[in-house]
Image (spheres, grey):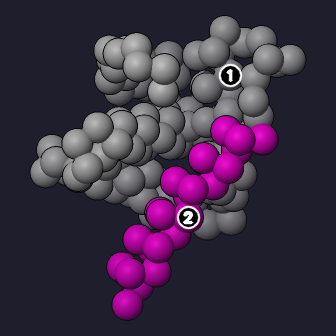
Amino acid sequence: MNGTAVAFKEPAPLTIDAEPDSIERAIGIATVNAIDSMAVGLIEFWESGRLSLEGKARGGAAIAAVYELQQAAPDGFDFVAVARAQALKILRARAGGQQQDFPEAPVAKIIDGVLAIVGRVEQAMAN
């Protein structure tokens, strides 16, 4: 840190206004909302040394939304591939669509982190 304070503005949750009937789009939006919630939680933890109850609830609700979509997906549907592709598409568009400047590899790791958490929820719910 250089000592300059920067005000963090929490991203507004995305909605499904553009394509309400598209499960793929809904999965991408839910995945990006989960990434946003996790980022807000990381900043909150970094600033205060703990995660508030509101932060925990926000993150839990965001992961639950992705999990619910995963459970509702039809048999044979490649949920992970769709979540990756759609979240990357949304995040790339959010960044201005500049392919050459978009850090795809690190963003893909963040998406995989959210999907890993959803996988752990799935395992816990199966037991």
Horizontal arrangement in the rendering, residue 111 relative to residue 99 (left or right): left
The crowding category of the residue bearing disc 1, from other C-alpha atoms within 10 Å (few below 14, some 14 to 19, many at least 20), is some
Indicate the position of residue 91 as horizontal and vertical percent values.
61, 26
What is the span of residues highlighted in magenta in the rendered image?
Answer: 105-127
Query: What secondary structure characterizes most of the magenta part?
Result: helix
Query: Type of residue at label 2?
Result: Ala
Q: Name the residue under label 2.
A: 116
Indicate the position of residue 32 as horizontal and vertical percent values.
50, 36
- Disc 2/disc 1 C-alpha distance (Å): 21 Å
Front-lying residue, 106 or 57:
106
Front-lying residue, 13 or 15:
13
Q: Of helix, strand and loop, which one carries label 1?
A: helix
Membership of 109 in magenta stretch: yes
Instruction: Identify the residue at the far bottom of this view.
Output: 127
Horizontal arrangement in the rendering, residue 47 relative to residue 87 (left or right): left
Instruction: Confirm whether residue 4 shows in the render.
Output: yes
Q: In which quarter of the image is residue 68?
A: bottom left
Indicate the position of residue 60 as horizontal and vertical percent values.
29, 54
Membership of 121 in magenta stretch: yes
Q: In this view, does 5 lie above or below 110?
A: above
Pointer 2 or 1: first along the chain: 1
Horizontal arrangement in the rendering, residue 41 relative to residue 97 (left or right): left
Q: Quadrant of the C terminus?
A: bottom left
Query: Type of residue at label 1?
Result: Arg
Tally the marks.
Answer: 2
Indicate the position of residue 116 as horizontal and vertical percent values.
55, 64
The crowding category of the residue bearing disc 2, from other C-alpha atoms within 10 Å (few below 14, some 14 to 19, many at least 20), is few
Q: Mark 1 points at which residue?
A: 92
Instruction: Confirm whether residue 61 shows in the render.
Output: no
